[in-house]
Image (spheres, rainbow, N blue to C red):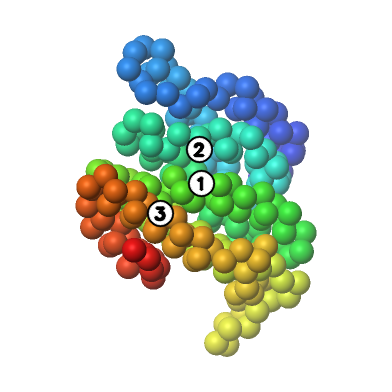
Amino acid sequence: MSPRIPSAFFALLACQAERELKPWIAKDDDLGQKMWRINQRIVKVIVELMRNHDTPESLVILSSASDLLLRATDEMLVDGEACTLPQLELLEATARAVQPVLEWGESGLAVADGLLNLLKCRLPATARCLSHPSAHVRALSTSVLRAILYAGSLKASGKKVDKNGIHGPAYQYLSVGNINWQTDIEKCLTWEAHSLLATGMPTQFLSTAAKELGCTISI
């Protein structure tokens, strides 16, 4: 068995990432490209920590580092795939971390709230990515929203759930934090559709994503 990494290590890592993270700006010059490379490395580390569900300390610390997470996903549409994809990957990893956190029971609620707060803040930007010219960005943003819908359907439980004869994980299919995620996502999709129509842009990609997500766009 590998030795457990002390929580102080993850706290130090988060502090260093917060100190070194740069603004997401257009990479028109050498400075912009350097800042992007720094940010991409930092976001990659955060994503790996989010995906490592065997180290709860990292999830606890990251969920409380709201400023770091918000800055890491601050400009999802600033300039092409190289900027957008890492930020979407972080949001997807965040959404997928909610389930293992809630398996801790009631003790995971505060951590889940921290993760879901980031997802809530980034819903409009994620919805805008559904109309991105890059098919990769569109696919990943759809995956992020699907993961958010699933994460929002879970709630911590103190006991295992036996579903269809299978001994399932410690959660129930209830809303976390009383947020209607589908309604909020549909509002963002509707806003984006109106924005596209107002500028004469097609809504085909947006409509396709909404159908895949089981969401309705009100126009």
Q: Nearer the viewer, residue 143 or 1?
A: 143
Q: Nearer the viewer's eye, disc 1 or disc 3?
A: 3
How many marks on residues? 3
List x then y, in percent, for residue 184.
51, 60
The amino acid on which the numbered mark 1 sits, given as a three-letter code, is Arg
Q: Nearer the viewer, residue 9 or 205?
A: 205
Which numbered tag is attached to residue 122?
Answer: 1
Residue at horizontal 39 percent and vertical 59 percent from the top: 190
Q: Is residue 20 left or right of residue 124?
A: right
Q: Is residue 129 above or below residue 65?
A: below
What residue is rendered at 41% in x and 12% in y? Answer: 31
Q: Which residue is mark 2?
A: 73
Neighbours of disc 2 within 10 Å: few (<14), some (14-19), many (20+): many
> Which quarter of the rendered picture does the C terminus lie within?
bottom left
Residue located at (45% from left, 27% from top): 24
**Residue 47 badge:** none
Q: CA distance from mark 2 to mark 3?
A: 20 Å
Separation of marks 1 and 2 at Cα, in angstroms: 8 Å
**Residue 196 location in percent, x, y?**
29, 49
Judged by depth in the image, the label closer to the viewer, 2 or 3, is: 3
Q: Position of residue 13 (x, y in %)?
A: 65, 30
Q: Is residue 10 visible?
A: yes
For the point 67% across and 49% down, which residue is it? 114
| Amino acid on which disc 3 is placed | Trp
Amino acid at pointer 2: Thr
Q: Which residue is mark 3?
A: 191
Q: Are marks 2 and 3 in contact (CB under 8 Å)?
A: no
For the residue pair 193 and 37, the one nearer the viewer reads as 193
Q: Residue placed farthest to the top in the image?
A: 30
How many residues crowd mark 1 within 10 Å: few (<14), some (14–19), many (20+)? some
